[in-house]
Amino acid sequence: KHNIELKGGKCGKALNQIWQKTDCFFGGSFDTPMTERTRLDRPYGQVDKYGLVDSFQLDESTGNNIQIIRANHKVQQTFSLNLHGDTMVHSEQGTTTQLSNGQTVFSTLVVDATGHESKLVLRQVRDAGEAPPGFQIAYGVAIETDAPTVDDPFFGPYDKDCMTLFDYRTDHLTTDRDSLKHAEKEPTFMYVMPLSDTKVFFEETSLVARDPAMSFQEAKDRCLKRLEYLGIPVRNVLEEEYCYIPMGGALPAKDQRVIGIGGAAAMVHPSTGYHLCRMLMGASDMASCIAEQLKKKKEDSAAVVSPDSIARHAYHSIWTSEAMRQRNFAVFGGEFLMSLDVKGLRGFFTGFFKLPLALWGGFLAGWKGLPYNVEHESWYKRMWFGINFIVRIPPEVAINMAWNIILYCIAEEGFPLPQSVTPLCGEPASYLLDDTKKGTA
C-alpha cells in the first residue's frame, strides 16, 4: 500500500484553478428571462492532469517489488468469457500474457484500466429491450481573447471570477430557423472556465445522447457560433479538446478473470459523465480488497482463494448490491435526460438546483465516500430525493418524468428502478458467487 499525496497544480493538490462560485443559465423557457443567472454557492476546480498523473507515478525505487514494463498486450480477440486467444491464457494459478515487445509475463491477476472500449473486459449480456450506452460528446477550445474591464468584468455574459457549468440558452441561433429547431431537439450547453484575464476555455457539450450521438463537427460549429453571437473574439486558439464519454450501459460480466477498473468497469456516472473522483474512490477500495485476498491466500493454504475468487471479490468491492441499486437510479436519470428537448432540460435543471445542496450534490457524487453521497445510499433516501425533485420542476416536465417512470418500470426486465427506490423486487445479483460451489478453477 502507498499513501498517495496529490501534487502539482497552481493551487496544490493537483488543482490548477478554483472558482468559488458556479453559474448556470437556463433562460428561454417557463417564463425564465434569457439573462437570468442561477448562481450556485459552490466552488469548482480544474484538475492539473499532469500533476495528477505525476502523483500516481510509481517506479522501481518505490520498493515493494514494483516492476514497470512499457509495452502493450498483443490483443487478438476476446471470444467469450475468459477466452482471449493465445496472447492471454488463464490457469488455476494466474494469467500468462504476451506483450508487444515479445516478452511473456505471468501474474496472479490482471487489472484492466484501458477504458470503456476495453478489448478484455466483457459486459453483461443485455436483456431484450435494455438500452445500450448513451454518449456525452463535447468540443472544447482554449482561446486568447480580449481582457474584460474593471467596469465590465465579463467575457460576454460570463463572469470572469466564476465557472459556468451550464448555458442552455439558444438565443445565438434565433436568426437561423433550421439550426434553432435542431438545437431545440438535440440540445447542447456551453461550459466556461476563465483561466486568466485573456485566456478562457469554452466547451460545447451534448450531455448524453444516442442514435446518433452529437458529432464533433456540430458541437464545434455551435461553439464558435455562440462565441461570435456573444461578441467574444477568438484572438488565438491555444488548444482544442474532443470529448467522448460512454454513459450507462451494461456492467462487467460476472465470473470473469480480468478485473476492470474505471471506464472498463462502467464507473462513469450514467447521468452526468463524471468519473475521476468515483474511479479514485473505487480504485482504493479495490486495491484494499485485492491486497486482503492475496494476504489471505498467502497465509492460509486451506482457504479457497483462487484468482477467480479474488476477481469476484475485487468486482464486489466496487459493485456491491447497494452500489448497483444507486447506479440503476442514475441510469434512469440518464435515460430521461436523453428524452428531453432543450425546454425540458432547462426545466429539469432549474428544479434540480432548487433542491437542498446535500440532495443535488449527493446525486452528482453518486459514489460511496464522496461528499453528500450519504443522501443517496439507501432506497428510502433516493425515494425522498425523487419526491423532493419532482415537486420542484415545472408541471410539464414533472408529468413527462412520471410517464417515463411508468414506461421504464414496464420495459426494463428485473425492475431496476423500483428496486432502487423501494425495498421490493429483491437486490441486484452479487458478483460474489459461492466459491465452495465454483471450486478453484
Image: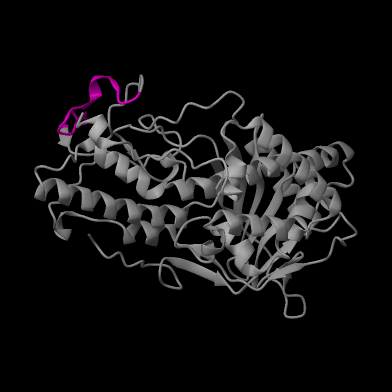
Q: Residue 422 appears at what percent x and percent y?
A: 60, 49
Q: Residue 325 appears at what percent x and percent y?
A: 52, 47
* Depicted 346 relative to depicted 270: above or below: below
Name the residue: 52% across, 63% down: 374
Q: Is residue 99 magenta?
A: yes
Quarter of the rendering occupied by the N terminus:
bottom left
Q: Residue 420 appears at what percent x and percent y?
A: 57, 47
* Depicted 88 relative to depicted 269: above or below: above
Q: Is residue 260 left or right of residue 296?
A: right
Q: Is residue 381 left or right of residue 175?
A: left
- Does the rendering let one see residue 6? yes
- Hey, which quadrant is residue 95 in on the image? top left
Q: Is residue 109 magenta?
A: no
Residue found at the very far front of the displayed protein: 424
In the foreground, 335 or 413: 413
Name the residue: 77% across, 80% down: 151
| Numbered range of the magenta stretch | 81-104
Name the residue: 86% across, 54% down: 29
- Hey, which quadrant is residue 13 in on the image? bottom left
* Depicted 114 relative to depicted 236: above or below: above
In the foreground, 362 or 261: 362
In the foreground, 150 or 409: 409
What colour scheme was applied to this rendering of the protein? one colour
- Does the rendering let one see residue 331? no
Q: Residue 122 appears at what percent x and percent y?
A: 40, 29
